[in-house]
Amino acid sequence: TIVNCPLLTSQRRRLSWVQLAGHKGSFKAGDEGSILKKFSENEKLCFERLKEDALHSFVPSYYGVVERDGELFLKMKDLLAEFDLPNVMDCKMGVSHANMLCMAGSLPAETPVLVVGLHPVRVMGGAHEERERPSYNNNNHFLCTRSQNLDAHLVRQTQGVPEGFLLTHILLHAERHFVQGVPLLTQEVKTYLEDELVRARVKPKLREDLYNKMLEVDSEAPTVEEKKQKAVTKPRYMQWRESLSSTNTLGFRIEGIKRGETCNTDFKKTRSKEDVIQVFKDFVEGNKNITNSYITRLEDIKQALKASEFFNKHEVIGSSLLFIHDHTERAEVWLIDFGKTTPLLDGQNLDHYRPWEEGNREDGYLLGLDNLLQTLSSLARE
Ligand code: ATP
Ligand code: MG
Ligand code: MG
């Protein structure tokens, strides 16, 4: 599908700004050369940590939190500002296991959910404070049922934790606080978590909307059973979606491309190495100088990632590399989107290559980067 690119403002200077992913309306134009992204506490913390990091020259400059029309935003550099009618590509990095983990939404309402070591101040607030207050014990952790779990929703909002990995991420945040002083065994947290995973898988909710989405893409995709019940579970849907894209084979997937005047965000079925090479070839329009600049930039990024303390200590989920070039052959790659990037426990670190297994938090980022480099190298050799 080719759609019109959503533009930030009608100012001529900005006519070429484009948003290739995310919800429409989560971005606003900032002052000259800057953009505003809807606030998330988690992403703010990442930007702050990145300021001092080896990666800082590969991340859009961050100018702090600002308020517009009563809403909070993160202000950052508009990476497109210095280009002339750029072509843009968003590649989402990593193997996205997290999407396939337990789906809090599919747990039965009475399922107990252990939420450990949260900051009550951050979690509480708004209209729900009175109604849904769970009981904290003096270790600053509590046990509540799914129906009392509104606080977790608030955590998700304030921390930018997306639908679908509520439990894992809250628990992992919790572990961090635990390490900072709450006396509870990490082991207990883990065991409980995996237990919930199993439950979520045993009795997940059937979703008619996801079944219909599946049919739209491929009428042969649902099983006989799923056709009979006209519904699929969320984990099943997520897994099916990932199996279509290159996420699990190549460690990245193309989210969207703007070339000339048109945007294309339908790369759901771009899966094989050959598919991806073709998409890149069209994107750079066969230009070797641009291809080589991209390769150099990705190699620099790889070096910076290896030196980066931030990268060593975070699980990077749902982050993208943004490729930008224009007719002057200026070509750059930037790391964007840290909404779901979360710190690891003290002392834990990732190699970003190893396959993901439940609990190891590996994200496959470097696997994706190597495959991107291979893709571009094969174009450069053609
Ligand atoms: P999602 O999580 O669904 O990917 P999101 O709301 O977290 O979306 P981003 O991925 O950060 O949003 O950005 C969405 C799109 O906006 C990107 O694909 C890119 O096209 C554009 N964009 C984001 N940051 C910048 C920037 N600093 N400069 C220019 N364009 C940007
Ligand atoms: Mg994104
Ligand atoms: Mg995001």
Image (cartoon, rainbow, N blue to C red):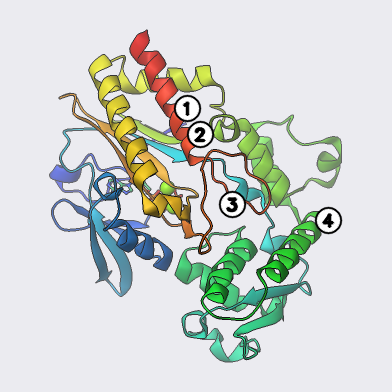
Could you tell which of marks 3 and 2 lies nearer the N-terminus? Answer: 3
In the rendering, which numbered label is found on residue 202? 4
The Cα–Cα distance between marks 3 and 4, rounded to whole angstroms, is 22 Å
Q: Secondary structure at mark 1?
A: helix
State yes or no: discs 1 and 2 in contact (Cβ < 8 Å): yes
Label 4: state its secondary structure.
helix
Three-letter code, disc 2: Leu
Whole-angstrom CA distance, mark 4 to mark 2, is 31 Å
Closer to the camera: disc 4 or disc 1?
1
Q: Is residue 295 left or right of residue 341?
A: left
Q: Position of residue 351 (x, y in %)?
A: 51, 44
Percent position of residue 128, x then y: 55, 85
Whether residue 114 is visible, yes or no, is: yes
Q: Which element type, helix, strand or loop, lies under badge 3? A: loop
Task: Compute the Cα span from label 1 to label 3.
Answer: 20 Å
Whether residue 253 is visible, yes or no, is: no
Residue plotted at (51% across, 81% down) = 119
Tag 2 residue: 367
Q: Which mark is residue 361?
A: 3
Q: Position of residue 207 (x, y in %)?
A: 73, 53
Q: Amino acid at mark 4?
A: Val
CA–CA distance between discs 4 and 1?
Answer: 35 Å
User: Against 134, is 111 above or below?
Assistant: above
Question: Compared with residue 42, is residue 143 higher up or lower down, i.e. above or below?
Answer: below
What is the three-letter code of the residue carrying label 1? Asn
Q: CA distance from mark 1 to mark 2?
A: 6 Å
Q: What residue is shown with label 1?
A: 371
Marked residue nearer the N-terminal end (1 or 3): 3
